[in-house]
Image (cartoon, rainbow, N blue to C red):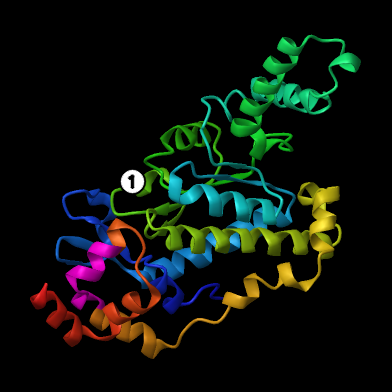
Amino acid sequence: MAVVTMRQLLESGVHFGHQTRRWNPKMKRFIFTERNGIYIIDLQQSLTYIDRAYEFVKETVSHGGTVLFVGTKKQAQEPLAEQATRVGMPYVNQRWLGGMLTNFQTVSKRLARMKELDLVDFDDVAASGRTKKELLMMRREKEKLDRTLGGIRDMQRTPSAVWIVDTNKEHLAVDEARKLNIPIVAILDTNCDPDSVDYRIPGNDDAIRSVTLLTRVVADAVADGLMARAGGGQRGGAEQSEPLAEWERELLGQGPDQSGASEGHAARGGDAEADAVEGSVADADAQSVAEAVAGEPSAEEAVATVQQPEQAEGETAQA
């Protein structure tokens, strides 16, 4: 079952890799071609790996597991927090503190302190029994804890899996997850090491549209897993799913708008579209590639890059 289409990947610029001088040779098998000094990722493989990661996340959540969303780079902060909050999963989008997983007992104490500060009324000096300076210091402490640990406020134990945007930048999270044998689902750009990831998705981890699309796909898998957990009933033996938390029941009670999000991407383009992409992506023009690497290619530019090789070659010559 396809959860995203080839056209969506193209419009989001998922196929653009890094410059050829910045690559990891282990990623060679995921590269379709090279054009004007930029590697082009094989989106056929990306579709296959997206399906595998989707099914894994769905099964993990349906059996009572949680997925920690990790992405502290600027492009990932907002979409990561938005999608994780939508499905009620913990996230880290500001700074990864060493020991968040391997020393979770200490992190839990900081979470308890943050919840304790939530009960303090910083504006009522007389009733608090503290001086203004003490309240000011406590307010600053609370703001710092909210910024670094606010996304994992409700995480009671280490997660069952982690979703990571840019494994090179989040190498501390990768190392801690591997030490604890926590499965890693991640975007793999052409400069990443595929051996450090359990469920890899070859794609662009720098463009905002690419990061947003792939993070939304993972969040949709979580939502499907929550619905399966709610409607699947009791499972036998050690695989019995845990009861839904209150926030999860509220999430499922929001109606079909959220639950239908993943179904909106269920149809994959036909074989003809995929063949057309394979046959013409090598003719991507240098101007559209440079724009995608620098930031955000538009939907029209991404599609034109693949579907109009002759026009693209003309623009390259003019540039």
Position of 269 with respect to 147 (left or right) is left
Q: Which quarter of the image is occupied by the C terminus?
A: bottom left
Q: Which residue is mark 1?
A: 193
Question: Depth check: 130 or 173 in front?
Answer: 130
For residue 91, above or below residue 62: above
**Residue sitting nearer the eye, 307 or 46:** 307
- Name the residue at 69% across, 64% down: 224
Whether 202 is drawn above or below 65: the answer is below
Q: Is residue 185 visible?
A: no
**Residue range highlighted in magenta:** 281-291
Residue 13: x and y in percent read 37, 67
298 left or right, relative to 266: left
Q: Position of residue 126 (x, y in %)?
A: 89, 14
Residue sitting at the far left: 317
Dominant SS of magenta comes to: helix
Residue 18 percent across, percent down from the top left: 26, 55
Q: Residue at x 29, y 57 (%)?
A: 294
Tell me the kind of residue under disc 1: Asp
Residue at screen point 68% across, 56% down: 86
Q: Is residue 64 magenta?
A: no
Residue 12, visible in the rendered structure: yes
Q: Is 112 positioned to the left or the right of 286 in the image?
A: right
**Where is residue 287 drawn, in percent x and y?**
20, 69
